[in-house]
Image: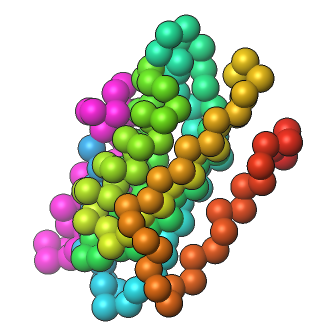
Amino acid sequence: MSDSIYSDLKQLGTMTGLPDDPAKAELERVQNPQADVMYNVRFVAPEFTSLCPMTGQPDFAHLVIDYVPGAWLVESKSLKLFLGSFRNHGAFHEDCTITIARRIADFTEAKWLRIGGYWYPRGGIPIDVHYQTGPMPEGLWIPDQGVPPYRGRG
């Protein structure tokens, strides 16, 4: 197991508490055993939560993260804990969404990343935040994120 691509993982398979701050959350990565193939990975977090930095009230979002890995894959438990660390973190929707995208893209050295942050309304206004690192890779099938414009998002 010492020469396994998984041997450096610290969180998977262990009791790991939820970090109380995104800056303290530790993303982990593993070598991509299919690095010679261009493909898309999608993570969907339909119950993402953070706090309004002004009122402390909870904010809720449906996040869709697409990325094209290079040499590294983000380990999904560490991603889950990273996303969960926003639960008690106060930041505006735009800051949460872009922070998540940049941290994953930088850490994994992704060839391409896109995030859709579809925030549920507070004060009657839903806010959708979209970001991508560059043009969509040519010749690669990346489906629509599938989240309809706000109409009660069900």
Q: Residue furthest left?
A: 2
- Residue in the picture at 32% in, 68% down: 110
Residue reaching furthest to the top: 55
Asked if one can make out residue 141 in the rendered structure from this viewpoint, the answer is yes
Q: Is residue 121 left or right of residue 4?
A: right
Image location of residue 66, percent across then percent down: 50, 65
Name which residue lies at 47% across and 53% down: 131
Query: On the rendered image, what quadrant is the N terminus found in?
Result: bottom left
Residue 84 position within the rendered picture, expressed as x and y whole percent measured from the top left: 47, 36
The furthest residue to the front = 135
**Quarter-of-image position of residue 61:** top right
Residue 3 falls within the magenta-colored stretch:
yes
Q: Is residue 23 above or below residue 145?
A: above
The coloring applied to the image is rainbow
Q: Nearer the viewer, residue 64 or 128?
A: 128
Residue 104 x, y percent position in the rendering: 34, 54
The part of the image, by quadrant, that contains residue 72 is: bottom left
What's the magenta bit mostly, secondary-structure-wise? loop
In this rendered view, identify the residue nearer to me: 69 or 74: 69
Closer-to-camera residue (138/48): 138
* Highlighted range, magenta: 1-25
Q: Residue at x 35, y 86 (%)?
A: 34
Residue occupying image coordinates x 84% and y 46%: 154
**Position above or below: 74 against 100:** below
- Residue 36 on the magenta segment: no
